Image: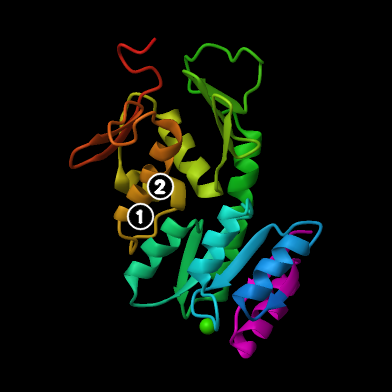
Amino acid sequence: MSRVLVVEDEQHLAEGLRFNLEAEGYQVQLVDTGEAALEKLTAESPAFDVVILDVMLPGIDGFGVVSQMRESGQFVPTLILTARGYPDDVLRGFAAGADDYLAKPFDLSILIARIRGLLRRREWLRAAPAVPAGSPAEPDGSKHVFTFGDKSVHFDLLELHVREQVFPLTLMEANVLRYLIEHEGQRVSRKAMLAKVWGLHEDTDTRAIDNFIVRLRRYIEDDPTRPRHLLTVRGVGYRFVASPAGSG
Ligand code: CA
């Protein structure tokens, strides 16, 4: 049974979410502050599978919660509930490390579909091979690992290994990276990434993608200001290159 943590200070909405998510077969815990959420996430075992996180909370807000989660190594898929009409909140949420968002007020059926999507994408990352067609076989025989140069992406662990360093990836960071790797050498547009990775939220500013790219470059590029793997294609989007020309 999947475990959902709902962080929502409007009691009526929180109780409604619990009732409906339990009816869908989820195990639900409610908290009404960000501080309580961070405590629960640290203390609770087994871990939660999904966090539904309101942005407007008393005390620390949803952005603060998700960024503290990520900094402390909590990479549970997190959907933020933003106020409609504040597109900047979506960008801030993704920049802070959120995996998905929904604008309030929302349809319950859409929230449930999004929760399923987050759970499914996590399974997809664990289950499916990440190696593009035509790539040489991985030395360790693993389908979950994509190696380029001295870096390797472990999709099953949501980790990026760069020499001795290990960077944990959020679900969405891994999804973005995986999509780019699957299209190695090809141009991919921001809109295509939004559609394929997020499942097309047509009201999302495509700059949301750029936040992920900036983060991924910090991990995988030796000099993030002069990227060699994650290239910008002006006016289109991005291109992933596993072995840049001239690299040893
Ligand atoms: Ca609120």
- Residue at 44% from the left image edge and 63% from the top image edge: 93
Q: Residues within 10 Å of mark 1 (few under 14, many from 20)?
A: some
Which amino acid type corresponds to the residue marked 2 in the rendered image?
Phe
Q: Position of residue 187 (x, y in %)?
A: 29, 32
Which amino acid type corresponds to the residue marked 1 in the rendered image?
Ala
- Residue at 49% from the left image edge and 15% from the top image edge: 135
Instruction: Answer with the quarter of the image where residue 243 lies.
Output: top left
Residue 10 within the segment the image draws in magenta: yes
Which of 103/220 is in front? 220
Q: Position of residue 29 (x, y in %)?
A: 74, 73
Q: Residues within 10 Å of mark 2 (few under 14, many from 20)?
A: some
> Which residue is identified by label 1?
208
> Which residue is identified by label 2?
212
Q: Which residues are magenta?
A: 1-29
Cβ(mark 1) to ligand 1 < 8 Å? no
Residue 35 is left or right of residue 79, and the answer is right
Which of 213/225 is in front? 225
Secondary structure type for disc 1: helix
The quadrant of the rendering that contains the N terminus is: bottom right
- Residue at 52% from the left image edge and 76% from the top image edge: 107
Q: Position of residue 16 (x, y in %)?
A: 65, 83
